[in-house]
Image (cartoon, coloured by chain):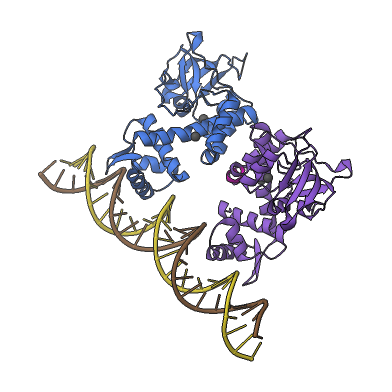
Chain colours: A purple, B blue, C yellow, D brown
Amino acid sequence: MLSDVMEDYLKAIYTLQTEDGDPVATSAIAEYLDVTPPTVTSMVEKLEERELVEREKYKGVELTPEGETVALEVLRHHRLLEAYLNEHLDYAWSEVHDEADRLEHHISEEFERRVAEALGDPEVDPHGDPIPNADLAPIEDDDTTPLSDHGEGETVVVARVSDRDDEELRYLSEAGVAPGTRLEVVDVAPFGMVTVRIRGGEAAPDDRREQSLPESVAASIRVRSGDSETATPESGVGGA
Amino acid sequence: MLSDVMEDYLKAIYTLQTEDGDPVATSAIAEYLDVTPPTVTSMVEKLEERELVEREKYKGVELTPEGETVALEVLRHHRLLEAYLNEHLDYAWSEVHDEADRLEHHISEEFERRVAEALGDPEVDPHGDPIPNADLAPIEDDDTTPLSDHGEGETVVVARVSDRDDEELRYLSEAGVAPGTRLEVVDVAPFGMVTVRIRGGEAAPDDRREQSLPESVAASIRVRSGDSETATPESGVGGA
DNA sequence: GGGTCGTATTAGGCTCGTCTAAAGTATAAA
DNA sequence: TTTATACTTTAGACGAGCCTAATACGACCC
Ligand SMILES: [Mn+2]
Ligand SMILES: [Mn+2]
Ligand SMILES: [Mn+2]
Ligand SMILES: [Mn+2]
């Protein structure tokens, strides 16, 4: 059996690997998990012995297929829990992460099945992140791009927002930006500040306010082209 | 903060204290938690430093009021979870304990509140055990007695069954004995074996089968007098 | 090719929760 | 009252997961 700490390391490596490309640096993991680099080195050695990661000293670390499967397992738990808390226990979209982060290690496979069933096997969580399927097949790259990559005049639909920063999440929730929201980029200022016109979506139906977003926020919002109407995801988005 | 291991010790001491009377022996805790006595001694010393238990060497251990509050807190989580799993996630009455036992340490107060609300603030869990209220007020002694204390001809209503033994629980579930079931004691054999006629209840409405229960099982079933119709609890009981 | 600097690893230590083996205590039996 | 027996505590150890301080590595600059 794997400890929940090990599961957290594997999840972290998975996330960093898909965010920033392949070999993940010790210091990146340390920062992500809020531990010191020596702690990471020793944990990674244990994971290597169990053949969950591959590692080259002083270079970096990558998940093996088995390691990836574990990461996807934990991620499936996390995202199903987020969806369940949002839909069935009335949690706001922005409140869901911490609870799921604790529970993800402690639910049974039975619980996972029943939650998935209660939700009707959803494909995305409340932040728009894809939920690994029950077979834990690797997730394919999606067709989303960071909002910060888009220029003035473009219309896009929000696909995913980051789920890790509480403050940012509350800010977006407040601003009416959520998965499914249609945005028009009206201005890109120096330093990457992006101003968008909010064109509705489930969270803010008829609103047409403008909203300026700092670069860091715009970079963490992933969008799809908003020209074709078919690109909108079916994610459910909850209260304030 | 308290570790989940500490919470488990306090819960164990609480349970043993209410089952068997006041000072709880080291070996009783060891057996209950499946650890060795020296382990218990050292843990109990830590709990004493934190003023959660009082202790006299070689005698036994008792909860302080603060210790009891922690135990009630954990018990509230446990029993609310059991009720929720049973009512909202379709778990059978007999499947609920292990899941709750893991999750009880990891849910937030927010989660507790929302679960309690979803259930309408229930007073008992699916096994008939009382759920501590949100203020964690001590639970008063109830008016139940072990089925094994009753004689031939008496009619009783099942109030509570043990929640710790999976096998026993499945057996009772199979037999149609659940909180709310009305029973008539038809025979008490040597060695305490009790034969009852099942008079219905939610789990077995019109059934009138007879069922023999070993002493150990009869001792763990707590009942109320079945003469007055008013004694039946309102507990919800789920599928097999 | 030799320094320089940031990053990674090694070395050693700590707490928590557990264990086994040895020693101490209480109590019931003789 | 002494002794036998059951139970408890002490002593010492270990793995997990973390830390700080010291050392090693490697990439980049001159
Ligand atoms: Mn799973
Ligand atoms: Mn999420
Ligand atoms: Mn609570
Ligand atoms: Mn119960």
State which region is magenta.
A100-104
Magenta includes A101?
Answer: yes
Q: Decide if residue B168 is on the left or right side of residue A125.
A: left
Q: How many marks?
A: 0
Q: Decide if residue A75 is on the left or right side of residue C29.
A: right
Q: Is residue B153 above or below residue B34?
A: above
Q: Is residue A238 above or below residue B225?
A: below
Camera-side residue of B143 and A165? A165
Q: Is residue B120 above or below residue B74?
A: above
Position of residue B168 measured from the top left corner of the image (x, y, whole percent): 53, 31
Q: Residue at x 78, y 33 (%)?
A: A205
Q: Quadrant of the N terminus of chain B?
A: top left
Q: Residue at x 49, y 31 (%)?
A: B76
Please identify the quarter of the rendering in which residue B88 is found: top right
Q: Quadrant of the C terminus of chain B?
A: top right
Q: Residue at x 42, y 23 (%)?
A: B190
Position of residue A134 measured from the top left corner of the image (x, y, whole percent): 73, 45
Position of residue D16 measured from the top left corner of the image (x, y, whole percent): 51, 57
Q: Decide if residue D12 is on the left or right side of residue D14.
A: left
Camera-side residue of B189 and B50? B50
Camera-side residue of A170 and D9? A170
Position of residue A160 measured from the top left corner of the image (x, y, whole percent): 74, 46
Q: Is residue B150 above or below residue A107?
A: above
Q: Decide if residue A39 is on the left or right side of residue A213.
A: left
Residue that protrudes farthest toward the right in the picture: A228
Query: Would you say residue A177 is visible in this rendering?
Result: yes
Query: Would you say residue A134 is visible in this rendering?
Result: no
Magenta includes A20?
Answer: no
Secondary structure mostly seen in magenta is helix
Camera-side residue of B118 and B239? B118
